[in-house]
Image (spheres, grey):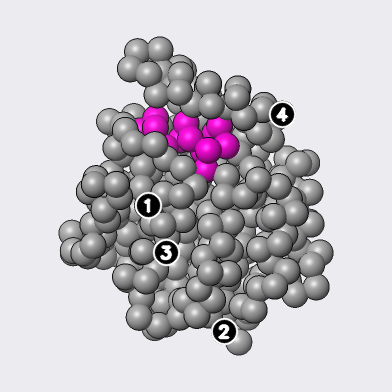
Amino acid sequence: MSTDLITVSDKNTIGGTVREFIWNWENKQIKVQYECLGNGSPLLLLPAFSTVSMRSEMAGIAKLLAPYFQTIAVDFPGFGESSRLGIEYNRVLFSQFLKDFVNSVFDTPVTAISAGHSCTYVLKLAQEQPSLFSRIVLIAPTWRGPLPTMGANKSIAVMVKNLVRTPIIGQILYKLNTTPSFLSLMYRRHVYTDPEKLTPEFIDYKWHNTQKTGARFAPAAFVTGNLDAVDSRDEFLGLVRNLSIPLMVAIAQSSPPKSLAEMEAISALPNVESVKISGSLGMHEEYPQIIVDEILPFLNR
């Protein structure tokens, strides 16, 4: 594993220094891009898993926190500007990646701010190696993928994932589910709360992210629940109950009901600080100023 400097990023990312983390997984070399901005103690920013997942969704938070911390935002393997190989993406891969990335890139305990599905991976690593983290903030945390949340059983989820992976039918299905009109619909339904922010330029930027070679493999795993790091709410909450690291949860009040119920369940635990914000599953990107205003006192303790 190694880390290399690439360039200073363009306007569509965060505006910091882009580096490349070379990671080996099952005899495959995966190039993972991450971006650094600011100075001070390290702060890791992990975007939510989604069809359009990329580090730039953390840009607002990174820029607002850069005067106080060195922010590091990463594109997960299979997403964003990282390698999008046609491999099997699963919980084992992402658990090992996060472990290797944090251990390789940071030499002091890091504060982690994660969104959506990535939250569970941070919690799992924090239980395994608590010395890696100084504080953790979870933004709209989730643990169950879209298809399982809608009631699909594992056999159906696996069938859908394998279908999307096929060369012709899978490509067609993926194209249909990543058209600009479909992306706009999904953002309006459960990602953003202000439709005026969903400009044609914004949707076009997201759409281009979905059209890269190999782009369908990792999102297909996420949608079908193959990136679920745990199998139940009890297991999800169990990651928090014995956590020794200071933890804060930002609840997205306008989230879909099932997702909101999971956020409220974790925030009800006695060792968790929480704040409620009027956003949905994409509030880390839509309302960065509100989030930073709420979490900065926690980060500075």
Q: In which quarter of the image is residue 98?
A: bottom left
Residue bearing mark 1: 75
In the rendered view, does 282 fall on the left or right side of 253?
left
Element carrying mark 1: loop
Tell me which numbered mark, 2 or 1, is placed earlier along the sequence: 1
Whether residue 6 is situated above or below residue 136 in the rendered picture: above
Please identify the quadrant where the C terminus is shown.
Answer: bottom right
Q: How far apart are marks 4 and 2 (CA)?
A: 41 Å
Q: Which residue is drawn at 40% across and 83% down?
A: 108
Residue bearing mark 3: 99
In the rendered view, does 66 fall on the left or right side of 130?
left
List x then y, in percent, for residue 181.
51, 23
Element carrying mark 3: helix
Disc 2 crowd rating (10 Å Cα; few below 14, some 14-19, many 20+) is few
Q: How far apart are marks 3 and 4 (CA)?
A: 31 Å
Contact between marks 2 and 1 (CB within 8 A): the answer is: no
List x then y, in percent, for residue 35.
32, 62
Element carrying mark 2: loop
Residue 151 numbered tag? 4
Disc 4 crowd rating (10 Å Cα; few below 14, some 14-19, many 20+) is few
